[in-house]
Image (cartoon, rainbow, N blue to C red):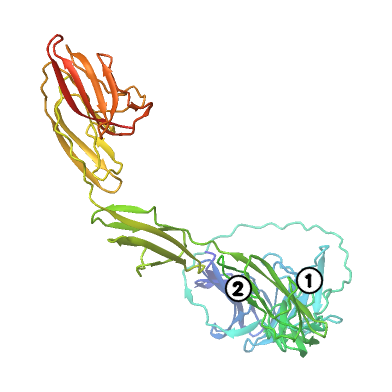
C-alpha cells in the first residue's frame, strides 16, 4: 500500500529479521544511522491520496523517540525534500521544484532538529536519480550535488561550503521555509514470514568519456526596486508604476504619498493625484528574505479637476443641467457650442463636451453623451357609449417597464370601473426613466332603445311582405334575424313566429313577432315597402294577385300631392317623382281593380314605405 510503510530490523551478521513495524498513513523516504547508533528517518503523512508536509525524526539506539520535526512553507507538499545525508552533527537535505531551474538546500542539527541554514540556488536544477539521493555531505561540511542546467540542457555538478555559500555567487535565504515540531508517526508491530530470495547475477558496466568544465552557476541577476514615474503632472492625472522585469519571485509594496490608492502590493499599478504639490512614491521590493527600496518624486501642478458625470438620458421635452462644478473665472472654459459658463442646459440628444485650462498649462476635457428615453405608450381603447345604467371596466395597456398609474379620478391601478359619463384620463409614469405617457377615453350613456310599433299585418302564401325595424328616434339600426339575416327590411313569406335583435351600437333589444295568415282569397296584394336601388329585389311598387284586373294605381305624398298615376296591368311606381328619385319615407296609394275580371270595381288604399 503506497500510503503505508514497513520498518524492518535485521541482524547484521545473520540477516535474520528481528522486528517488523508498520507505519500507517506514512511514507518513509530514507533512514540512516550515526556512529552512536541513533536512527534518523524522513517520511511524509499520506491519506486520501494527499501528501502532508515532509517530516523528520530521531530515535536513540534503544528505539526511543528523541525529536520529530516537519517542514512548512512548501508550495507543493508532493516535493520530496526527504532524502538526506548525515554530516558531522547535522543532516543535509536537497530538493528542487519540478518546473523551475532552482535548487533548495537546508541543514538541521542532529541534537534537536533545529534549522541551521537554508539556501536557494538559481541556474541549476537538482536531479535525484530514482530512489537515490544524488548529493553528498563531505567531512569538512561542504555539500555537493548532481544537477542539470537550463537551455541548452547539460549535466552539472555543484558544491557549496559549510555555510551553504559558493564563491563568486550570491545565494539567498528561502525565508518561507520553517521547521516546526510534529507528532511521531503511529507504529505497530506486525508478523513477518521469511522467504528465500532469488539469486542475483552481477551486471556489466559500460564505460564512457564525459567532458567536465567549469560553469557560471549564478546566471540570474539580482532584483532591484528601481522604477520610473512621470513628472510633472496635472491635478487629477494618473501615472503607472511597475517593478523591473525578472524571473525571480519578487514581492512589491508601494507607498503613494498624496495619491489614490495610498498603497498597493501589485507588481504594477495606477495611482491618481488630485491635489497640487510634491509627493514621494516609495517602492519596497523583496525576495528570499532580502529587500531593496527605491524612491521617486512626483510634482503635481495646479489644474482643473472635474467630471460631467456619466452618460445619461432625459425624457422628451425635458432638460438637463450639466454642471462641471468649477467656479466661474477659475479656469478658461469652453463648451462644444462655444459657451464659457461652468454649467450648460441641454435639451437635445447629442455629445456635450467641456474643456477647462489653467494658467499653468494644465487642461482637461470631458464629454457627456445625452440621449432621450422613449415616452411610455398608454392605450385605453376607443371612446365608448354605454346603454342605460351599465358599467365598464377600463383595462389600460402600456409598455412602461415600471409603470406608476394615476387616473383623473385619483385612482392608482391599471384598471378602472366607470359608472358615470365623462372623460377619463390616465397618466403612466415609468419609474425606470421618470417619463410619463397619457391617454383619455370618453364614456357616454345612451337611453334604452325604443322601436317604432309595427302595423298589424298578415301574410298569404305567394304574397310576401317586407317588415322594417325602425328606432323611434329615427337613429340607424343594425338587426339580426333568427335565421342570421341582417336585411332591413326583411321579407316575410309565410305565417310564423319571428325573432329579431336590434342594436343602435349602445343598446340592444329583442323583438318577437307573430305573423298570422291573412285573408288569402284571390284578390289584390300591394307590398308595404320597396327599395328602388336596382339590386333586382323589390325595386318597384306594383299590385299583385291572381285573377285580378288592375284599372288604376295612384301614389300620393304625405301632403296629398299626386306623384304617380298608372292604368291597367302595366302600372308600377319606380320611386321617382317629377323626374327625380323620391326621398325615403312613407307614401299613400290607391288602387282600383276588378276581382275577377268583369265584376264591379273595388278600391284599396294604404301606405307603402320607400327605402333608400
Looking at the image, which residue is at 37% across and 61% down? Answer: 423
Q: Nearer the viewer, residue 228 or 98?
A: 228
Q: Which residue is mark 1?
A: 124
Looking at the image, which residue is at 65% across and 86% down? Answer: 110
Please tell me how crowded label 1 is: few (under 14), some (14-19), or many (20+) other residues with Cα within 10 Å: many
The spot of residue 213 in percent (x, y) is 89, 69
Residue 198: image tag? none
From the image, which quarter does the C terminus lie in?
top left
Q: Secondary structure at mark 1?
A: loop
The spot of residue 84 in percent (x, y) is 68, 76
Residue 13 visible somewhere in the drawing: no
Q: Nearer the viewer, residue 210 or 172?
A: 172
Question: Can you tell which quarter of the image residue 212 is in?
Answer: bottom right
The vertical placement of 19 against 566, above or below, is: below
Spatial CA distance of label 1 from label 2 is 68 Å
* Label 1 close to label 2 by CB (< 8 Å): no
Q: Which residue is mark 2?
A: 320
Looking at the image, which residue is at 23% across and 47% down? Answer: 449
Q: Nearer the viewer, residue 53 or 360?
A: 360
Residue 182 visible somewhere in the drawing: yes
The vertical placement of 494 against 349, above or below, is: above
Amino acid at each position: 500500500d503506497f500510503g503505508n510503510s514497513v520498518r524492518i530490523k535485521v541482524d547484521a551478521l545473520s540477516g535474520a529479521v528481528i522486528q517488523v513495524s508498520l507505519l500507517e498513513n506514512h511514507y518513509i523516504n530514507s533512514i540512516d544511522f550515526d556512529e552512536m547508533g541513533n536512527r534518523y528517518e524522513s517520511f511524509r503523512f499520506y491519506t486520501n491520496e494527499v501528501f502532508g508536509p515532509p517530516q523528520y525524526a530521531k530515535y536513540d539506539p534503544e528505539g526511543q523517540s528523541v525529536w520529530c520535526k516537519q517542514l512548512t512553507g512548501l508550495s507543493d507538499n508532493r516535493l520530496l525534500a526527504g532524502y538526506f545525508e548525515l554530516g558531522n552533527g547535522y543532516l543535509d537535505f536537497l530538493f528542487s521544484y519540478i518546473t523551475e531551474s532552482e535548487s533548495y538546500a537546508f541543514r538541521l542539527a542532529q541534537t534537536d532538529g533545529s534549522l541551521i541554514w537554508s539556501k536557494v540556488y538559481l541556474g541549476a536544477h537538482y536531479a535525484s536519480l530514482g530512489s537515490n539521493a544524488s548529493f553528498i555531505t563531505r567531512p569538512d561540511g561542504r555539500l555537493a550535488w548532481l544537477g542539470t542546467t537550463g537551455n541548452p540542457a547539460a549535466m552539472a555538478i555543484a558544491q557549496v561550503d559549510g555555510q551553504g555559500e559558493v564563491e563568486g555567487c550570491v545565494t539567498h535565504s528561502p525565508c518561507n521555509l520553517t521547521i516546526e515540531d510534529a507528532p511521531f508517526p503511529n507504529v505497530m508491530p506486525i508478523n513477518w514470514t521469511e522467504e528465500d530470495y532469488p539469486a542475483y547475477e552481477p551486471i556489466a558496466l559500460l564505460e564512457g568519456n564525459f567532458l567536465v568544465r567549469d560553469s557560471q552557476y549564478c546566471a540570474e541577476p539580482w532584483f532591484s526596486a528601481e522604477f520610473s514615474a512621470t513628472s510633472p503632472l496635472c491635478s487629477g492625472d494618473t501615472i503607472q508604476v511597475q517593478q523591473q522585469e525578472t524571473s525571480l519571485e519578487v514581492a512589491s509594496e508601494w507607498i503613494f504619498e498624496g495619491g489614490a490608492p495610498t498603497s498597493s502590493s501589485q507588481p504594477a499599478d495606477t495611482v491618481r493625484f488630485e491635489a497640487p504639490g510634491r509627493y514621494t512614491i516609495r517602492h519596497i521590493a523583496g525576495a528570499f528574505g532580502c529587500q531593496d527600496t527605491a524612491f521617486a518624486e512626483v510634482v503635481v501642478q495646479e489644474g482643473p479637476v472635474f467630471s460631467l458625470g456619466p452618460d445619461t438620458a432625459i425624457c422628451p421635452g425635458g432638460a438637463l443641467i450639466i454642471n462641471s462644478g468649477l467656479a466661474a473665472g477659475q479656469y478658461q472654459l469652453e463648451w462644444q457650442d462655444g459657451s464659457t459658463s461652468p454649467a450648460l442646459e441641454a435639451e437635445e440628444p447629442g455629445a456635450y463636451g467641456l474643456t477647462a485650462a489653467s494658467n499653468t498649462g494644465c487642461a482637461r476635457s470631458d464629454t457627456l453623451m445625452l440621449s432621450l428615453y422613449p415616452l411610455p405608450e398608454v392605450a385605453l381603447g376607443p371612446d365608448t357609449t354605454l346603454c342605460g345604467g351599465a358599467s365598464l371596466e377600463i383595462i389600460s395597456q402600456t409598455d412602461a417597464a415600471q409603470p406608476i398609474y394615476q387616473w383623473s379620478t385619483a385612482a392608482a391601478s391599471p384598471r378602472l370601473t366607470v359608472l358615470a359619463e365623462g372623460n377619463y384620463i390616465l397618466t403612466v409614469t415609468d419609474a425606470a426613466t421618470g417619463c410619463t405617457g397619457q391617454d383619455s377615453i370618453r364614456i357616454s350613456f345612451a337611453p334604452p332603445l325604443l322601436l317604432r310599433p309595427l302595423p298589424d299585418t298578415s301574410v298569404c302564401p305567394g304574397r310576401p311582405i317586407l317588415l322594417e325595424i325602425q328606432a323611434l328616434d329615427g337613429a340607424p339600426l343594425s338587426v339580426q334575424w333568427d335565421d342570421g339575416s341582417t336585411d332591413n327590411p326583411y321579407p316575410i313569406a309565410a305565417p310564423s313566429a319571428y325573432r329579431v335583435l336590434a342594436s343602435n351600437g349602445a343598446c340592444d333589444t329583442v323583438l318577437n313577432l307573430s305573423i298570422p295568415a291573412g285573408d288569402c282569397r284571390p284578390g289584390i296584394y300591394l307590398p308595404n315597402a320597396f327599395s328602388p336601388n336596382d339590386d333586382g329585389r323589390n325595386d318597384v311598387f306594383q299590385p299583385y294577385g291572381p285573377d285580378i284586373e288592375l284599372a288604376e294605381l295612384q301614389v300620393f305624398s304625405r301632403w296629398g300631392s299626386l306623384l304617380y298615376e298608372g292604368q291597367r296591368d302595366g302600372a308600377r311606381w319606380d320611386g321617382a317623382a317629377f323626374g327625380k328619385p323620391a326621398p325615403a319615407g312613407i307614401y299613400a296609394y290607391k288602387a282600383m281593380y276588378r276581382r275577377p275580371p268583369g265584376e264591379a270595381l273595388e278600391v284599396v288604399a294604404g301606405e307603402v314605405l320607400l327605402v333608400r
